[in-house]
């Protein structure tokens, strides 16, 4: 139990000290070639699975085009990683979810759990982007950026309804006038009822908050089901 404990990362040819870090310097000073230690061999992802992006003072490491971590001390391993074959890029790929969305995901994870290294799943972000951009059928009243008339104007229009109904009672003998009054009265009822009928298409991200979460849940479930069906179909085709 008193032995040093080291990890040997064979693909990198690198030894990391877990317990017994100071012994390395001590044995070097004493010119002793070997340290009694418990050595555990560790693997490392192949370089073709990794990409590093340096953008605006930030460094992002991406594994398998899916999992992202922020690197704060990339200079310590730049030469080693470059020699290993990991590519360094300065432009965020267009096929990835937007970088601002990735940054927001890191902030959200830090708010939930401030311990450890946060990892962002690009596949999950891509799914959320697809959900937000999916068009659903909703009522006009569910759209967030609709600018409605002032309440005073609506009250004036609503007040015309009983006036028109009373006028229709006196216009029974005049068919043309009766038709005009009926048309105007129907228009008023249509104006007040249409905003609450599911008749318009709108992206999920543009909905009011009270209905957005419901549609996000439904659309996400449908997209995840489609993805599972696609994976099953691909697996079956590969087996054949």
Image: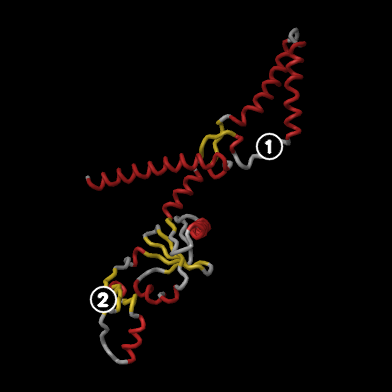
Horizontal side of 106 relative to 156 (left or right) equals left
Horizontal side of 195 relative to 22 (left or right) equals right
* Whole-percent x, y for residue 222 in the image: 42, 40
Q: Secondary structure at mark 1?
A: loop
The answer to whether residue 113 is above or below residue 203 is: below
Q: Residue at x 31, y 74 (%)?
A: 12
In the displayed orientation, state which residue is furthest to the top. Answer: 173
* Whole-percent x, y for residue 200 in the image: 56, 34
Q: Label 2 belongs to which residue? A: 38
Q: Secondary structure at mark 2?
A: strand
Q: Depth-wise, is mark 1 or mark 2 nearer the camera?
A: 2
- Residue 148 tag number: 1
The answer to whether residue 161 is above or below residue 5 is: above
Mark 1 Cα shell of 10 Å, populated few (<14), some (14-19), many (≥20): few
In the displayed orientation, state which residue is furthest to the front. Answer: 1
Q: Residue at x 38, y 73 (%)?
A: 81
Q: Residue at x 54, y 45 (%)?
A: 205
């Amino acid at each position: 139990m008193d032995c040093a404990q080291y990890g040997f990362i064979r693909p990198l040819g690198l030894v990391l000290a877990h317990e017994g870090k100071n012994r390395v310097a001590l044995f070097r000073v004493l010119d002793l070639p070997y340290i009694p230690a418990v050595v555990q061999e560790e693997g490392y992802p192949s370089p073709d699975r990794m990409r590093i992006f340096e953008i605006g003072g930030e460094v992002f490491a991406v594994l398998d085009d899916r999992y992202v971590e922020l690197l704060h001390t990339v200079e310590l391993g730049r030469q080693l990683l470059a020699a290993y074959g990991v590519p360094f890029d300065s432009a965020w790929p267009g096929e990835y979810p937007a970088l601002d969305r990735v940054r927001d995901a890191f902030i959200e994870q830090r708010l939930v759990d401030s311990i450890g290294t946060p990892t962002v799943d690009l596949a999950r972000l891509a799914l959320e982007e697809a959900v937000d951009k999916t068009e659903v059928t909703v009522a006009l009243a569910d759209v967030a950026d609709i600018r409605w008339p002032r309440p005073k104007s609506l009250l004036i229009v609503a007040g015309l309804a009983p006036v028109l109904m009373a006028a229709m009672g006196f216009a029974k003998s005049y068919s043309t006038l009766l038709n005009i009054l009926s048309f105007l009265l129907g228009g008023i009822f249509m104006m007040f009822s249409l905003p609450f009928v599911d008749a318009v298409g709108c992206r999920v991200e543009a909905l009011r908050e009270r209905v957005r979460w419901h549609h996000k849940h439904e659309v996400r479930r449908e997209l995840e089901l489609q993805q599972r069906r696609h994976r099953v179909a691909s697996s079956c085709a590969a087996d054949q």
